[in-house]
Amino acid sequence: MSRASLFCLSLFASLLIAGCASKTTQPSQYSGFLADYSQLQPAKSPSGAPVLRWVAPTFKPDAYPEVYVEKPVFYPAPKPSDTVSQATLDQISDYLQKAIERELSQRMRIVDTPTRDSLVLRSAITAVDSSAEDLHVYEVIPIALVLAAANTAAGTRDRDTNIYLELEGVDARNNEPMIRVVRKGHGLKLENDSTQLTLKDIQPALDSWAKDARAFKP
């Protein structure tokens, strides 16, 4: 994705909402990656970021000495294009997986294959929205479409962006969901809409998500 392209990606192709300026993901921006959004409630991440989350009443962190981190995906799945290569998508996904494993290794064993003692973490980068600096109009387009089309944003202003994550933790024994979280990463800025997106552009948000995963408390 070009920087502008990814920024202009988000959940539904026809949406153009000022409401994207909200600090938490809105219901219209849910991607469908999670099976159920109905029980999500506003909360704070360990770093103080606003999130939406649900924790199963039966969830006991001590019951999971191990964690298996699935490779994060883009959802809906995008296709590479001239503006963003498959290599860039793979770099972002690989980096997020390694960042989560690095942080969680400080409190749990990281395993290559889930066992009965494992919590399985599944995550997806589902959307990005952007606003041209000084215009404050947010464009929301599905991540799956951005790679298949030319840049949809016009102009050369700096662009402020938010990137969206959906994550769930599942009990490996019975595949029952234990945790669901939906959140934004804030404060990213691209120079304009004509340059390609790189891992470096969104790395701060990925690092923040990983650190909050380590410090998570029910």
Image (cartoon, rainbow, N blue to C red):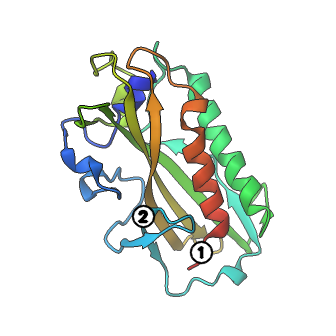
Furthest residue toward bottom: 58
- Closest to the observer: 205 or 11? 205
Q: Amino acid at mark 1?
A: Asn
Q: Position of residue 131 (x, y in %)?
A: 30, 34
Q: Which residue is mark 1?
A: 174
Q: Amino acid at mark 2?
A: Pro
Q: Position of residue 121 (x, y in %)?
A: 61, 60
Q: Position of residue 137 (x, y in %)?
A: 22, 36
In 3D space, how far apart are the residues under numbered discs 2 and 1 (Cα atoms)? 30 Å
For the question of whether residue 114 can be seen, the reply is: no
In the rendered image, which quarter contains the C terminus?
bottom right
- Closest to the observer: 34 or 199? 199
81 lies left or right of 218: left
Q: Secondary structure at mark 1?
A: loop
Q: Which residue is mark 2?
A: 50
- 10 Å neighbourhood of mark 2: few (<14), some, or many (≥20)? some
Asked where in the image residue 215 lies, by quadrant, the reply is: bottom right
Q: Position of residue 212 (x, y in %)?
A: 60, 62
